[in-house]
Image (cartoon, rainbow, N blue to C red):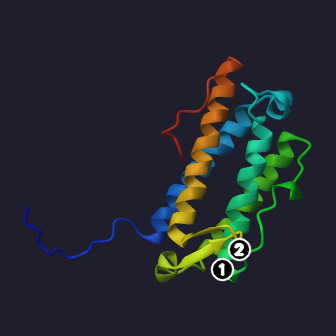
Amino acid sequence: MTTTATATKQFMTSDQLLEHWQGHRNLTRRVIEAFPEKELFEFSVGGMRPFAKLAGELIGIGGPALKGIVEKNMEAYNEEGFVPKTKEDILKKWDEETEVINHYYSQITEERLQETFNLFGQYEFPVYQNILYFIDNEIHHRGQGYTYLRALGIEPPFFWERF
């Protein structure tokens, strides 16, 4: 097998990565909106957490993690800080955290994306891998939300309609 040297080309810019992530966040927001109020907080399948709890986890990761990365703070993850009582509480906080994500993400340089950071004092990976984890985790939990909605007889939003 022969190997040839080629110039490294960038797959995507950091702005494109943020746009991709925010597309997922837009879709997850629409999944939250699709839930009836009661079921958002109470319905589960197979012992999994209700979607309100899953949304709370996602709210507790993105913005706080990026803030930690920018400020080089390895404070432990805290999901218990936000305890919503209504769907409106979740949507309001979701939108607030979207702005937090935009604010801190804009402070992370292309070079910084390659640096290793011990996120929440537990996850020591390059910054870009942590961000990809945030996206993967959201997709995973949104899939649970799709299962819940279908079990409730509600058609979820099309997964490809992110914007």
Q: Is residue 103 visible?
A: no
| In the depicted structure, whether residue 4 falls above or below residue 22 | below
Which residue is the site of mark 1? 70
Q: Quarter holding the N terminus?
A: bottom left
**Amino acid of disc 1:** Val
**Amino acid of disc 2:** Lys
- Mark 1 vs 2: CB contact within 8 A: yes
Q: Is residue 65 left or right of residue 10?
A: right
| In the depicted structure, whether residue 88 falls above or below residue 59 | above
| Percent coordinates x, y for residue 122 in the rendering | 68, 67
Q: Residue at x 92, y 43 (%)?
A: 85
Q: Nearer the viewer, residue 120 or 160?
A: 120
| Percent coordinates x, y for residue 93 in the rendering | 80, 55
Q: Nearer the viewer, residue 95 or 110?
A: 110
Q: Residue at x 68, y 45 (%)?
A: 29
Which residue is the site of mark 2? 67
Q: Marks 1 and 2, how far apart in space?
A: 5 Å
Q: Residue at x 86, y 48 (%)?
A: 89
Q: Nearer the viewer, residue 29 or 131?
A: 131
| In the depicted structure, whether residue 113 falls above or below residue 44 | below
Q: Is residue 118 visible?
A: yes
Secondary element at tag 1: helix
Q: Residue at x 66, y 66 (%)?
A: 101
Secondary element at tag 2: helix
